Image (cartoon, grey):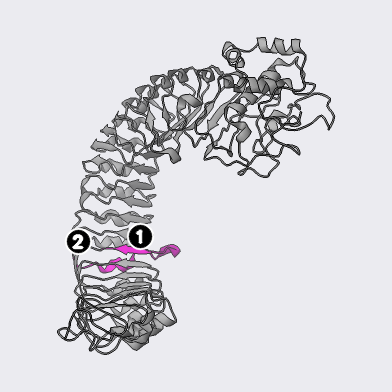
Amino acid sequence: MASPSSKDNGEATTKVGRGSLAVVLGLGACACLGAASLFEGSSENNATQVNNSPVRRRVLQGEDAMATFRSTLPDYTLTNLQNSASPQSQAFDWLSGIPNLDTSDTTRMTQLFAMATIHYALDGPNWSRQSLRGPNDFQWLNYSHPECYWDPQWTHACDQNGHLVNLNLDHVHTDATSLAMPAEIGLLSNLYSVSYQVEMDVTVEDLLPPQFFTLPKVQSIALSTVGGTLSSEIGTLSNLRSLAIYHAEELANSNTYGPLPTELGLLTNLTEINLVNTGFQGPLPSELGQLDKLGRIGITGTGLQGAVPSELGLLSRLTTIALVNNPGINASLPSELGMLSRLSGIDMQGNSLSGPIPSELVGLTDVSILDLSRNKLASSIPSELGLATDLRRITMEDNQIVGLIPSEMALLTRLTDLNMAHNRLYGLPSEIGLAVNLDHLNVGYNEITGLPSEVGLLTSIESFDASHNAIIGELPTEIGQMGPSAGRRMWALDLSFNSINGVLPSEVGLMARLSSLDLQNNNIAGPLPASIGMLSYLQELDLSSNSLSSFVATEIGLMDGLKKLNLSSASLIGDIPSEMALMTSLTDIDLSNNPSLSGPIPEVLSDLVLVHDLQNMDVTGNAFLSGEVPSGLCELNSVNRTYCDQGGRCAFSFDCGQLCGCGTCACNGGEVSRSGDVFDGSP
């Protein structure tokens, strides 16, 4: 039967919708070995086109046979069949039009009818094919294709008996604004798992009608919705193993969800639960503690409130718990979490947890990841944590943790990442140097007053951030030993915004592969060591707001990989060394607010603009630069130059008109045009 909405073996409409539906059913599915075509013994000519339009049937089955089949349908379907425009009536007409259909196989007919009803109910005639593999791949309701192959994405849609177990609507798009799964999904009694990815205004109830909860074999559910309430009938799905509910991101402003039903505790075969960016309200049900097969809990970005149930400590098979970005989850961490001997990962960042960190976590010898960042934890770090010997990453940033990092943490020989930033810690133990595998150490934004020389033993370190603390005194010379072992590369050192004084130790030049060095806002004195020129991989150097006094060593020109140089407010004196012209990778130079700089801008710096990549230069707040600006600097994206020739005419000793690429430039607060005209009335 040819469809009036398609031709040439199923030519598709190409109407693009703003939404998408996806259903993936895949647990335990077998290859579809027994799927038959939609008709028996038909010729090639009879294997005609897709019929997905709501027209009356042309080829009729025996009236008695169809009447018999109709009598097997449930009352809710019979009611809808009274409406000739309903998805059920359209599906019945399509089924009646299949040539030579074996009407004795009522199981097959029921499956075909249910699938066709789903197709019409979900706006199937207007599905877009743009995301599919080709213009002729989409075969829904095509008489010449078995239903197990209606979508080219399907590989294991049916079992060996031809029963649909995996319903896959991936890459199906429609511009319909609101849809609902029909009750007839309850006729697909062999479904193992169901996943709907829907970027449209649908709720949980729209996707899971009451009849869905009668399916005895469902093992996996994944939904993408904009709200709704999860029915208490979920507890009837005794074979359910995986439950995932995601929020439709494109409709993020609509996010009204109900509470989680306590009947989740009846799902004794459940192995994982994932709730992502949903607005479920109320408490996290304590009944989850009854699910002794549960291996993973992932609850992210919800509106759940209250304490983490202590009953979770009963989940002896739990390997991962991720309660992330749920600001309503508060109170203390239950000590019972220490009973979860199989736990390998704890991620509870972004909640409102308070109180101490339970020392019972010491029993979690298999935990490799512990993330408690962005909470309100307000205690010291328990020393017992050093006994969790498999820990590889600890993140506790942005809490109110106080005290000293316990020396016992040096026992964590597998630790690679330690982030304790934004707390109230006041010290690093000397034993920190024993953490020989530490790659990343961040203790920025604390109250640390000093660095132990043992930091030089961190030969595997790649980044070290101790910025925004209260570190005083000179840098230990051992700092130059950080990170050179086994081909490792220490690429970032940030000690900015402290009170470090004295000169920069020459050993810093041993950090040969350093790419970023930030020492701004300290009291470091000059001269800079000549060894700084050995940092040939350095790309960013910030020594602003220090007391360098003498200008940088001429060896700075050896850093030909440097891209950004900030020496503003560094108390520099003397001339700009011409060796800076050798820094051929520079894109940004900031020499502002060094009133004791003297002499002209070296002419050779023009090459950094004309030949290389220099884009921005700031020399504001200085009293130097007699003569003209080198003509090559006219091509800079921006040149800031004020207070030129203090007390004199702005354009007299600094010809802003030379800056042909700048339009105007600021001099002593006045604007000077390309021609050198001063607009502020200067003499």
Of residue 92 and residue 398, the one placed in the foreground of this image is 92
Q: In the image, which residues are magenta?
A: 473-495
**Left or right of 255 on screen, residue 158:** right
**Residue located at (32% from left, 73% from top):** 565
Q: Position of residue 642 (x, y in %)?
A: 22, 78
Of residue 299 and residue 72, the one placed in the foreground of this image is 72
Residue located beneath label 1 in the image:
463
Quarter holding the N terminus is top right
Quarter holding the C terminus is bottom left
Examine the rendered structure and indicate whether residue 482 appears above or below residue 19: below
Q: Position of residue 475 (x, y in %)?
A: 23, 67
Amino acid type indicated by mark 1:
Ser
**Residue located at (29% from left, 31% from top):** 335
Give the Cα distance between marks 1 and 2: 18 Å
How many discs mark residues in the rendered view?
2
Q: Position of residue 243 (x, y in %)?
A: 48, 29
Q: Is residue 493 magenta?
A: yes
Q: Residue furthest left?
A: 647
Residue located beneath label 2 in the image:
471
Is disc 1 placed on a helix, strand or loop?
strand
Locate residue 117: give its quadrant.
top right
